[in-house]
Amino acid sequence: MAKQLARSPRILHVAWGEMRVEGLPDGKDFKLYPGGGREWDWSETGTRHEPGIQPADVDELLVRGVKAVVLSRGMHLRLLTAPATLRLLEERAIAVHQAETTEAVAIYNRLAASEPVGGLFHSTC
């Protein structure tokens, strides 16, 4: 019998500064992956709007077996992604989707219905 992979939680609501995710307490920014997620604390990896999402930010997603990663850029597209992060994902043959936050949520929810996907979501600028 094949092992059933944990499903990635759906995002139920996103608005400026607030997100509601299936099975998790409400929050502002999230790291989501198959089987769960947690609030995304930028101070853990030194993430800032520029140079943006760090390789260490996606490590937690990779160890959970994601096949695709959705990176939200914020509601006003202010959050960048560091080139080293994109190189890491390319080296691991992980599909990457970068988009404005509400668009990123739609992409993530669509992918979560059929494959192990992870995401980093920023609900403000």
Image (cartoon, rainbow, N blue to C red):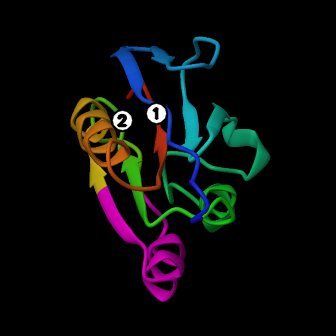
Q: Which quadrant of the rendered structure holds the C terminus?
A: top left
For disc 1, the neighbor class at 10 Å (few under 14, some 14 to 19, many from 20) is: many
Q: Which residue is mark 2?
A: 74
Magenta-colored span: 81-97
Give the amino acid at mark 1.
His
Q: Which residue is mark 1?
A: 122
| The residue positioned farthest toward the front in the image shown | 1
Q: Which x, y percent locates residue 34?
A: 57, 47
What distance separates the C-alpha of mark 2 from that of mark 1? 5 Å
Q: Which quadrant of the rendered structure holds the N terminus?
A: bottom right
- Residue at 31%, 34% in the rendered image: 105
* Residue at disc 1, secondary structure: loop
Give the amino acid at mark 2.
Gly
Residue 93 magenta-highlighted: yes
Judging depth in this view, the residue of 114 and 78 nearest the camera is: 114
- Residue at 30%, 29% in the rendered image: 75
Q: Which x, y percent locates residue 15?
A: 34, 13
Q: Which x, y percent locates residue 53?
A: 53, 56
For disc 2, the neighbor class at 10 Å (few under 14, some 14 to 19, many from 20) is: many
Is 9 on the left or on the right of 44, as rendered?
left
